[in-house]
Amino acid sequence: MIIKQLSVFLENKSGRLSDVTEALSENGINISALSVADTSEYGILRLIVGRPEKAYELLKNLGFSVSLTDVICLIIPNESGTLYKAIKVLASNGVSIEYMYAYAMNGDASVIMKVSEVNKAIETLTENDVELAKASEICN
């Protein structure tokens, strides 16, 4: 249930995102989810990809500042209140959310979260019937 996420520190200029996606494309690495958070000069590109360790080595060898981070992915119904319930369970058990990104499609929402305590979050959410995706389900 732990998913490896790539974080790439990028200079905020034209072509940098293209450079990353080109490198992944040329090596047959598929992107399942991504988020870009930016400032005026730099951004952090977060990616869920197939073969994250290979992608990490590839980008590192190309000179990108890259890291691997453990995250979780909740699968919740795309209905009002379901995200609130999951977040409340984490908060009630002392697990902090550092950041998250999500998308909804076909009746469900996938929510990728970086939390303060990954194993505690997995245990707490599972005990409260919140479905978690396996890496093999979202990384291809």
Image (spheres, grey):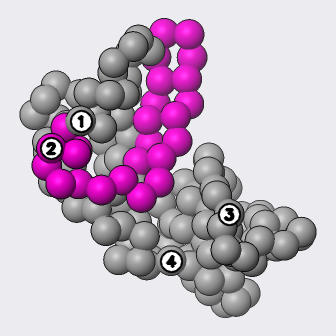
Is 30 contained in the magenta span? Answer: yes
**Residue 62: quadrant of the picture:** top left
Residue 26 got which mark? 2
Left or right of 43, for residue 64: left
Going from the N terminus, do you reach mark 1 or mark 4 first?
Answer: 1
Look at mark 4 in the image and give the residue it sits on.
Answer: 133
Q: Are marks 1 and 3 in contact (CB under 8 Å)?
A: no
Q: Between label 4 and label 3, give the one nearer the viewer.
A: 3
Q: Residues within 10 Å of mark 2 (few under 14, many from 20)?
A: few
Mark 2 vs mark 3, CA separation in Å: 29 Å
Label 1, secondary structure: give it.
Answer: helix
Q: Are marks 4 and 3 in contact (CB under 8 Å)?
A: no
**Amino acid type shown at disc 2:** Glu
Look at mark 1 in the image and give the residue it sits on.
Answer: 22
Q: Between label 1 and label 4, give the one nearer the viewer.
A: 1
Mark 1 vs mark 2, CA separation in Å: 6 Å
Q: Are marks 1 and 2 in contact (CB under 8 Å)?
A: yes
Going from the N terminus, do you reach mark 4 or mark 3 first?
Answer: 3
> From this viewpoint, is residue 55 visible?
yes
Name which residue lies at 46% across and 31% down: 44
Q: Residues within 10 Å of mark 1 (few under 14, many from 20)?
A: few
Q: Does residue 6 sit above or below 119 in this rendering? A: above
Q: Position of residue 114 (x, y in %)?
A: 54, 54
Q: What segment carries the magenta color? A: 23-47
Going from the N terminus, do you reach mark 4 or mark 2 first?
Answer: 2
Residue 104 got which mark? 3
**Which quarter of the image is occupied by the C terminus?**
bottom left
**Amino acid type shown at disc 3:** Ala
